[in-house]
Image (tube, rainbow, N blue to C red):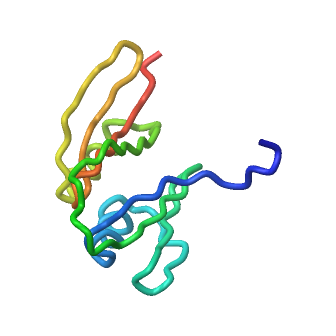
Amino acid sequence: MKNLKTCRVNMMVSNMDEAIDFYQNKLGLELTSRYGDHYAEIQAPDLLIGLHPTSEKIVKGNNLSIGFGVVEFDATIKELESNGIGFKMEQDGWIRLAYFTDLDDNQLFLAERTE
């Protein structure tokens, strides 16, 4: 794919303002653009997250997972916990994982290689 410019994950959200608040203020990511209540883009390192509002029923969790690789795993966990985010921790061989969800139960995780 020679012409690939960006990669993103898009997800449906039940409330655009609350979704933006979660990603921007709780996770500390940057809101790069917003088109009214139709669409917003949140920038994470090497990942663009597109938020689409829907009036249809959100299927909680809907098999979507967004991962964030981190360098200082424990410090990141502590910072996000202070923002009210809870985690389910897991060690999977050479990787540490901390699973959490957003306001619509979409699964997110932090990851750090241990080797």
Residue for point 33% across, 45% down: 108
- Residue extending farthest right: 2
Tell me residue 45's x, y (percent).
55, 51
In this view of the protein, which residue sits in the foreground, 26 or 51?
Answer: 51
- Residues 10 and 86: in front is 10
**Residue drawn at the location 61% of the way across and 51% of the way down:** 7
Q: Is residue 43 left or right of residue 2?
A: left
Residue 59 vs 13, above or below: the answer is above
Position of residue 10 relative to residue 109, above or below, is below
Q: Quadrant for residue 6, please give it.
A: bottom right
Tell me the quadrant of the picture where the N terminus can be found. Answer: top right
Q: Residue at x 40, y 83 (%)?
A: 37
Residue 52: x and y in percent read 41, 69
Q: Is residue 42 above or below residue 76?
A: below
Q: Residue furthest top?
A: 93
All told, the count of numbered labels is 0
| Residue shown at 54% from the left, 72% from the top | 32
Return the residue nearer the eye: 29 or 105. Answer: 105
- 60 vs 12, left or right, is left
In the rendered image, residue 60, in percent from the top left (x then y), is placed at 21, 52
Horizontal side of 58 relative to 108 (left or right) equals left
Say which quarter of the image contains residue 107. top left
- Left or right of 79? Residue 31 is right
Q: Nearer the viewer, residue 3 or 97?
A: 3
Q: Quarter of the image holding residue 83?
A: bottom left
Q: Residue furthest front?
A: 56
